[in-house]
Image (cartoon, rainbow, N blue to C red):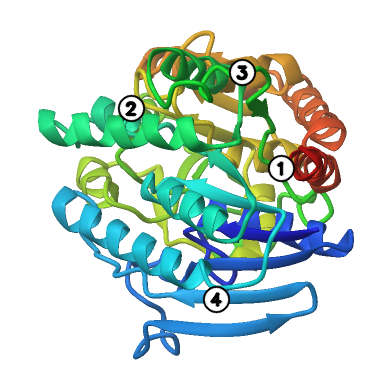
Amino acid sequence: MRLVVVTPHFAPDVAPTGEVITRLVGELGARGHAVEVITSFPWYRDHRIEPGYGGRLTRHEDTPWGHITRVSPFATADKRNIARRAAAFAGFSALAAAVGSRGERADAVLAVSPPLTLGATGYAIAKARGAAFVFNVQDVYPDVAVRLGVLTNRPVIAAATALEHWCYGRADAITVLSRELEDNVSAKIAHGGRAGSQSAPGKIHVIPNFVDTDAIRPAPRDNSYRSEFDLRGKRVVMYAGNVGLSQSMHTVLDAAAALEYDDDIVFVINGQGAARTDAERRATGLRNVRFVDMQPSGRLADVLAAADVHLVPLKRGLAASSVPSKVYSILAAGRPVVASVDEGSEVSRLVEEAKAGIAVPPEDSEALTKAIKNLFDSPEEAASMGQAGRSFVEGSASPTVVAEAYEALFAELARA
């Protein structure tokens, strides 16, 4: 099959979603499919275009499996400036649509959201090239932005919601990461979108993100990362990922304060993002908290292995709209996880079903502290949870399993 993938990030960009899509494209290419990727210049690490990619609106690369077209993301460093971010997304999406609409006939177009505007891009490319349109929803927007309080302007919310329903109505298939996101999108399709297509049976498909179970596997804790950041001999509680507006960092820091009496326990916040400056300010005076900048993607396995316990702290109400891909990476590394998330959410269900850790209520620092302490007090149970998580991802979230699911979906749509 000839496939077109429209994604906001792709290697060498280091965004988690980009890493997932990069591996998916590699798997599809290895299975004999020709893949054309339309993406942005790398910019995620510092929210500015990386050296060597600027100066032009588009760049082209040939690959063993197909072709990559990169276009300017019109990146803005201020994630809180909604107007500038919306303009950047719109500009990137329009440029990607113009570039992607030129080309030979394709079998399917996969467009990744957020940004939501890439739904319109994917649809335009699919129409121009006679292909089926598959809309991949990583996070449900505008729900996430509204719950964070980042998006408050009612006309803007209404416009984003209308675009969301428009994309759902025009997609031939929608892929989501969890049953909870499936329920969210199904409810919206039932009450909006384009008449006739929105109620098609089997339109929504649950296909989780995956983790590279070859690159990330259980490894010794005492590695180069621990040596570099003076963590040898410590019991490490790790948050590794985007330090953004979705994460409840104040809950993590409250737990660190409660456990400061134990000189062996160190909390490591590894990553950057819009909320890091506030988190660093809040952590002033805490001797057991260390901030580490985002590490190169090739070092991810060492970062994950260096922890005794990993944290997934989401603010209240957000677990229903987002499934962090880092959860699968933690499980692949064979480390127990404490998820501070909404009860009954997909993240909570995943942790409990895999028997890979403990789920506690969101923004409850006392519950988070107790869970961390329980794992340190029961090292054999913690080790068992890590082993169970590894077994779980090997059977349900490996690159091969996920690529096969997408391949089957594309083939089904191509025959329709």
Which of pointers 3 and 2 lies earlier in the amino acid sequence? 2
CA gap between label 4 and label 1 equals 24 Å
CA gap between label 1 and label 2 equals 24 Å
- Element carrying mark 2: helix
Task: Tell me where residue 192 sits by quadrant.
Answer: top left
Which of pointers 4 and 3 lies earlier in the amino acid sequence? 4
Does 63 sit left or right of 41 as displayed? Answer: right
Q: Quadrant of the N terminus?
A: bottom right
CA gap between label 4 and label 2 equals 30 Å
Residue 357 drawn at (x, y percent): 66, 21
CA gap between label 4 and label 3 equals 33 Å
- The answer to whether residue 262 is above or below residue 241 is above
Question: At 73% across and 74% down in the image, what residue appears?
Answer: 66
Does 261 sit left or right of 416 as displayed? Answer: left
- The answer to whether residue 191 is above or below residue 234 is above
Are the residues at dot 4 and dot 3 in contact (C-beta closer than 8 Å)? no
Residue topped by disc 1: 210
Q: Residues within 10 Å of mark 3 (few under 14, many from 20)?
A: some
CA gap between label 3 and label 2 equals 16 Å
Could you say which disc has been placed on residue 179 in the image? 3
* Residue 236 visible: no
Residue type marked 2: Asp
Residue topped by disc 4: 69
- The answer to whether residue 191 is above or below residue 8 is above
Which numbered mark, 1 or 2, is in the foreground of this view? 2
Q: Residues within 10 Å of mark 4 (few under 14, many from 20)?
A: some
